[in-house]
Image: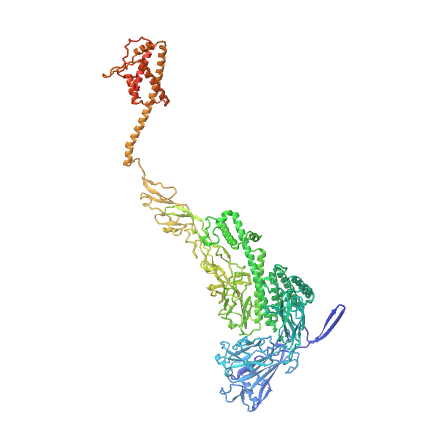
């Protein structure tokens, strides 16, 4: 609406080449267009049984296409009425009559878009149709009580409305600026359903369009309070030689109120008439609709717009080098048949088919019938022509193609007439292309990128597309080779360059998009991301933006009412582009997952190194012993702090991860890097966030594709099915009444691989999901809604965005509570030990996704307005597939003995607000784990719509997903902590509320039964048993201490018995001991007899020792005196001789002691001088010997005693001489004294050692 009606515009085109220039001009005079006349109802059967009934003809849908806001209010309407007339059996055609004759109001309002007819007036007017002036109806006359009514199958009425704009003052049928529409009524006297068809926009349908006929019906006796269920049946009236109403040709069932035929099913130039029958009676009455008397009907006719034909496609040269040879593609001799009229001008689209059979357009809907282009490598190997194909075009010398295999490439041509009908060549056309050598590809890429830049400088966006799509497909056919310059990173960079240039061309030169522009845009996107492993995250983002722009443009045109002839092709290319993007995103997600794994390795190493620094290398290894085998894990030493226990736990995870990675020191060096120990690095986190956004954008694209493909659907039309390698979508247009309880089942393809990075169902099985909408739907009273269910095979939403933690089954270690004093017996002895021991504890990790993601969208038909909640009270049920073999923690029933955390299988949804997986509003209903051979699924109820998936989730100790039941500090699921708490409520304190079974709580301590004592009645003490009946038990403890001092308070004369100091038994009372002691008989005998004997022996020995020592002393003194005597004697007698000596000696005579008397039988013996000398010598010898033996005098032997006695007292000794009394000389006195002593010695020697009183001597 940019050109003004009545204005004249001159358009001039100037072309120049250097200094030369040429121009051409054309004048455009703008005139108003003709309005569009639409008359509802169609040709139909009306009932005249109720004469008071008003029948309405409605042309309100008519509009002026020149108006910016088309409306019937600015139009003029003129009604014309006709009835069929016959003369006898001859039909003379329709005759015009005044519509006022049958109008309900008796007159027709001027410019009214509606004409209301009274049934009674119309019946009465039928008299004008025959000469007999009888009441005539088309059918149903023989079954009424009105005998005057006659049936005539040719008795019909025709109504025509002429529509003009307000600029036409005298609007009438046939005016050049008018448009008209007509319907034909058949009549009946039966009360049949009122059936109507919506006005169609055209009578000629192109082979790219879906033929749509919209029906409606109401029962003759229906009312709004209790609507009657209607039954329908479509039949083909003509041609009658064959029927198009077959399943292969239809998008709706023949029993549906609407009829939709697939594009291209109309053939030839014939007119097709389809009739809709409806009845409020039993559906089986429609088995033969023509015989159904109570059935109403309406019908419409359509015909095909014949496509262009009779032409051909030429390709010159027929062979060349890929991306080097310039080919000329030409459409020749195409015409549009003038049946009934031709529809020029023709438009041309050139394309080639890639290895997947997808058409990649080089030029779309262009007025040019010939293009010059370069082509990628072909798809089917073929022998190279001889001689080799020449290279041509700019830069052709950059590659030769020598030695590279040739392939043939199918070239496509689509010719479209002005109404959108497409024609194609009858025969296939091929070009033979020889692949470029790997060494030539970098130079070739550089040249093509330069050509794209040149096209962009010329503002030729579609030319940029043409170069880009061919180069992208060349890359798709060339695998990366690390040995050459064409590496994976090189190809990824080239694809990023192509994406950037294509995106710029789209936004600057191609928008606003035509259908052809959309096709070409989607084709280049599909080609650039044709190999998902070679597209970067940035490239995916750029291409996603291109698809977004394209889909938004298409949807905007559809919302404006545009009928896009290429909608099917647009949908196919959108599917392919989105599939390629899903693949690329899945690879990117796998890369992020690998990055997360590297980050996990770094965290493992950091934990290991940190722990070694904390406790030392040897201690760290010792505490981590048993890793990898849960059954062999050692419990952590008691008393460790919580931080140390966490460090050991991290260490075990680190060692397990490192062992499983099976990497060496070099890998450790690369893994340790400089990453953050607490999680993904900043770059990795940004990558995850970007992928999450791209995933959400991709889901939005799938939703837009669904809207595009269902945009032209009718009520009751079969769901649109989109089957791609990455996803499958079912989209259905559903009226509000059918939404309640609607069930949608969707099944995918057999799965070959299921991994944590790309979770699906078990390999070899088919993923299947089911959605059941609530039985009560509370939505705005809109006419229709779109229900979209999509199953994704490659989940584009990152599983790393998981806020929930699950058990890591291979990280079991054992935990002990803090050691506290606990009783070991009833005597009051305690030991320091933990209350809970060897409690299994697991590390946690982010929960894993386990199945296919399923998208559920409900939106208002033809709009992007999505429904978030279908009902405030009822929920939607979803049954989702999953692979139970990916994780086993849930099926193994593992539970953390401290926290009570378990892992369960449930449903999650993607929260587009937070960009994370969430369980809000979801309730798990049932789980079926079929293992490897049977399908596994989880059924959940949700109060909202979104993207759903099966995942591991957190569960409470009872196994309920996200449950609130907790495990208390005692390890009891759902407990209150009392089972291991004392009366003070402190768990794991060693105290018990049970008071050892011998008391009850009284505040923070136990009130004990008799004979039990302590903070929890753990000590037993009985006055009789423990205190021997002679005392009273007394106990003492401080506060809540387990250490209890229990003792007996003994009665008088009793005291506690001493006990081992290392134990604390209650010491019994024993009698205080007195000074009485009774020994056993044996001991008493030993003491009474043995002890005195022992004392006697000892005393005797001591006595003799003392006597001997005294004798030695005396003998020593005597010796000295004798020696003195001898010395003096010798001195005195020094000058004497022997005789004198002998005489002196003979005269010497021993003097016996006083009172000494010899025995009667033993006369005195006379001792000679020689004997005395001899005795002296022997005495001297004996003394010397005794001195050498410590001056002891041994007892002489018997033999020596006898000899000495014989010598001194022998009877045979010679008698001494009797001398006169000696002189009174002092020396003589001393000599006598010496002799007396000598005699004494002799006696002593003879008698043995004995004590001899000095007086006796």
Horizontal and vertical percent for residue 97?
60, 86
Q: Quadrant of residue 1146?
A: top left
| Observer able to see residue 682 | yes
Residue 726 sits above or below residue 842 on the image: below
Q: Which of 486/717 is in front?
A: 486
Horizontal and vertical percent for residue 1049?
34, 42
| Observer able to see residue 513 | no
Q: Which of 669/1091 is in front?
A: 669
Residue furthest right as drawn: 19
Taking the spot 29% from the left edge, 32% from the top edge, the residue there is 1090
Horizontal and vertical percent for residue 443?
67, 62
Residue 301 sits above or below residue 1229 on the image: below
Horizontal and vertical percent for residue 899?
47, 55
Q: Quadrant of residue 1025?
A: top left
Quadrant of the image for the N terminus? bottom right
How many discs mark residues in the rendered view?
0
Residue furthest left as drawn: 1160
Colour scheme of the rendered structure: rainbow
Q: Quadrant of residue 706?
A: bottom right
Residue 506 sits above or below residue 258 on the image: above
Taking the spot 45% from the left edge, 56% from the top edge, the residue there is 967
Quadrant of the image for the C terminus? top left
């Amino acid at each position: 609406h940019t050109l003004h009606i009545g204005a004249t515009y001159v358009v001039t085109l100037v072309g120049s080449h250097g200094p030369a220039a040429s121009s051409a001009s054309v004048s455009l005079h703008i005139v108003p267009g003709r309005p569009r006349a639409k008359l509802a109802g169609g040709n139909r059967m009306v009932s005249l049984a109720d004469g008071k009934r008003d029948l309405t003809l409605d042309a309100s849908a008519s509009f002026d296409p020149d108006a910016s806001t088309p409306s019937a209010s600015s139009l003029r309407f003129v009604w014309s009425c006709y009835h069929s007339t016959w003369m006898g059996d001859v039909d003379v055609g329709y005759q015009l009559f005044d519509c006022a004759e049958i109008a309900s109001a008796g007159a027709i309002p001027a410019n009214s878009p509606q004409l209301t007819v009274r049934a009674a007036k119309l019946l009465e007017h039928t008299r004008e149709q025959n000469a007999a002036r009888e009441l005539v109806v088309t059918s149903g006359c023989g079954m009424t009580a009105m005998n005057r009514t006659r049936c005539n199958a040719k008795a019909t009425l025709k109504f025509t409305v002429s529509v003009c704009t307000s600029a036409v003052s005298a609007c009438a049928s046939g005016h050049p600026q008018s448009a008209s529409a007509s319907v034909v009524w058949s009549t009946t006297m039966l009360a049949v359903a009122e059936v109507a068809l919506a006005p169609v926009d055209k009578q000629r349908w192109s082979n790219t369009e879906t033929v749509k006929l919209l029906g409606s019906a109401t029962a003759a006796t229906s009312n709004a309070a209790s609507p009657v269920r209607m039954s329908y049946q479509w039949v083909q009236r003509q041609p009658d030689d064959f029927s198009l109403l077959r399943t292969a040709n239809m998008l709706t069932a023949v029993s549906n109120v609407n009829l939709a035929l697939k594009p291209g099913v109309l053939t030839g130039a014939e007119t097709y008439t389809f009739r809709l029958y409806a009845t409020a009676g039993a559906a089986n009455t429609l088995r033969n609709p023509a015989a159904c008397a109570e059935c109403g009907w309406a019908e419409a006719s359509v015909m095909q717009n014949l496509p262009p034909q009779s032409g051909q496609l030429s390709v010159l040269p027929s062979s060349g080098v890929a991306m080097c040879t310039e080919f000329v593609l030409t459409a020749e001799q195409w015409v549009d048949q003038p049946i009934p009229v031709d529809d020029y001008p023709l438009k041309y689209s050139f394309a080639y088919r890639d290895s997947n059979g997808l058409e990649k357009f080089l030029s779309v809907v262009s007025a040019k019938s010939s293009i010059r282009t370069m082509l990628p490598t072909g798809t089917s190997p073929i022998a190279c022509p001889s001689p080799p194909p020449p290279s041509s075009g700019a830069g052709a010398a950059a590659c030769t193609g020598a030695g590279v295999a040739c392939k043939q490439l199918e070239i496509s041509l689509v010719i479209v007439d002005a109404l959108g009908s497409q024609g194609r060549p009858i025969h296939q056309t091929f070009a033979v292309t020889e692949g470029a050598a790997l060494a030539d590809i970098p130079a070739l890429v550089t040249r093509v990128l330069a050509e794209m830049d040149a096209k962009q400088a010329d503002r030729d966006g579609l030319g940029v597309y043409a170069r880009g799509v061919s180069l992208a497909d060349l890359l798709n056919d060339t695998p990366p080779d690390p040995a050459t310059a064409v590496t994976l990173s090189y190809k990824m960079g080239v694809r990023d360059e192509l994406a950037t240039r294509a995106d710029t061309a789209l936004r600057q030169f191609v928008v606003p998009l035509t259908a052809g522009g959309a096709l070409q845009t989607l084709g280049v996107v599909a080609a650039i991301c044709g190999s998902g492993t070679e597209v970067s995250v940035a490239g995916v983002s750029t291409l996603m933006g291109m698809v977004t722009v394209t889909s938004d443009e298409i949807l905007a045109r559809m919302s404006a009412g545009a009928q896009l002839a290429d909608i099917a092709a647009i949908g196919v290319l959108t599917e392919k582009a989105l599939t390629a993007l899903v693949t690329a995103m899945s690879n990117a997600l796998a890369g992020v997952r690998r990055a997360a794994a590297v980050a996990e390795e770094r965290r493992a190493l950091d934990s290991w190194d940190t722990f070694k620094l904390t406790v030392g290398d040897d201690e760290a290894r010792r505490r981590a012993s048993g890793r990898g085998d849960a059954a062999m894990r050692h419990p952590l030493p008691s008393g460790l702090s919580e931080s140390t226990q966490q460090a050991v736990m991290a260490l075990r995870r680190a060692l397990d991860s490192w062992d499983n990675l099976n990497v060496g020191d070099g890998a450790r060096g690369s893994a340790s890097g400089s990453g953050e120990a607490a999680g993904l690095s900043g770059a990795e986190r940004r990558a995850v966030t970007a992928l999450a956004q791209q995933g959400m954008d991709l889901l939005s694209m799938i939703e837009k594709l669904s809207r595009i493909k269902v945009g032209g659907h009718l009520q009751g039309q079969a769901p649109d099915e989109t089957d791609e390698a990455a996803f499958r979508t079912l989209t259905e247009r559903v009226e509000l009444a059918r939404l309640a309880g609607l069930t949608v089942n969707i099944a995918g393809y057999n799965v070959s691989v299921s991994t944590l990075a790309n979770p699906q169902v078990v390999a070899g099985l088919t993923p299947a999901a089911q959605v059941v909408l609530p039985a009560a739907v509370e939505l705005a009273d809109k006419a229709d809604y779109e229900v979209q269910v999509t199953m994704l095979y490659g989940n584009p939403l990152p599983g790393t965005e998981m806020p929930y933690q699950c058990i890591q089954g291979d990280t079991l270690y054992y935990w002990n509570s803090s050691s506290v004093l606990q009783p070991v017996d009833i005597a009051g002895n305690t030991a320091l030990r933990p209350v809970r021991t060897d409690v299994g504890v697991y590390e946690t990790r982010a929960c894993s996704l386990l199945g296919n993601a399923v998208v559920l969208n409900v939106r208002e038909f033809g709009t992007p307005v999505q429904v978030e909640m279908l009902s405030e009270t009822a929920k939607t049920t979803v049954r989702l597939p999953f692979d139970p073999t990916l994780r086993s923690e849930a099926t193994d029933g593992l539970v953390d003995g401290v926290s009570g955390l378990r892992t369960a299988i449930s449903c999650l949804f993607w929260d587009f607000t937070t960009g994370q997986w969430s369980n809000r509003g979801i309730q798990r209903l049932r789980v079926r784990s079929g293992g490897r051979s049977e399908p596994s699924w989880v059924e959940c109820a949700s109060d909202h719509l979104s993207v759903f998936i099966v995942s591991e989730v957190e569960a409470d100790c009872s196994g309920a997903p996200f449950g609130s039941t907790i495990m208390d500090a005692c390890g009891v699921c759902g407990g209150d902590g009392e089972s291991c708490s004392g009366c003070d409520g402190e768990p794991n304190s060693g105290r018990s509320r049970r008071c050892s079974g011998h008391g009850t709580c009284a505040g923070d301590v136990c009130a004990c039964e008799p004979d039990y004592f302590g903070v929890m009645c753990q000590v037993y003490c009985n006055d009789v048993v423990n205190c021997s009946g002679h005392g009273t038990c007394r106990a003492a403890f401080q506060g809540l201490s387990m250490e209890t001092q229990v003792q007996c308070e003994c009665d008088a004369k009793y005291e506690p018995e001493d006990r081992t100091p290392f134990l604390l038994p209650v010491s019994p009372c024993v009698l205080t001991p007195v000074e009485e002691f009774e020994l056993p008989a044996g001991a008493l005998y030993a003491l009474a007899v043995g002890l005195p004997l022992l004392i006697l022996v000892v005393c005797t020995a001591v006595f003799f020792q003392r006597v001997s020592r005294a004798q030695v002393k005396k003998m020593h003194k005597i010796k000295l005196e004798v020696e003195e005597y001898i010395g003096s004697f010798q001195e005195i007698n020094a000058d004497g001789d022997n005789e004198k000596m002998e005489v002196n000696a003979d005269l010497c005579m021993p003097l016996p002691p006083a009172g000494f008397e010899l025995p009667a039988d033993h006369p005195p013996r006379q001792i000679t001088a020689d004997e005395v000398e001899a005795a002296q010598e022997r005495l001297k010898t004996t003394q010397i010997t005794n001195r050498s033996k410590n001056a002891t005098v041994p007892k002489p032997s018997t033999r020596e005693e006898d000899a000495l006695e014989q010598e001194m007292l022998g009877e045979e000794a010679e008698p001494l001489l009797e001398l006169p009394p000696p002189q009174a000389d002092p020396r003589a006195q001393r000599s006598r004294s010496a002799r007396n002593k000598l005699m004494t010695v002799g006696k002593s020697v003879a008698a043995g050692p004995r004590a001899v009183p000095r007086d006796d001597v």
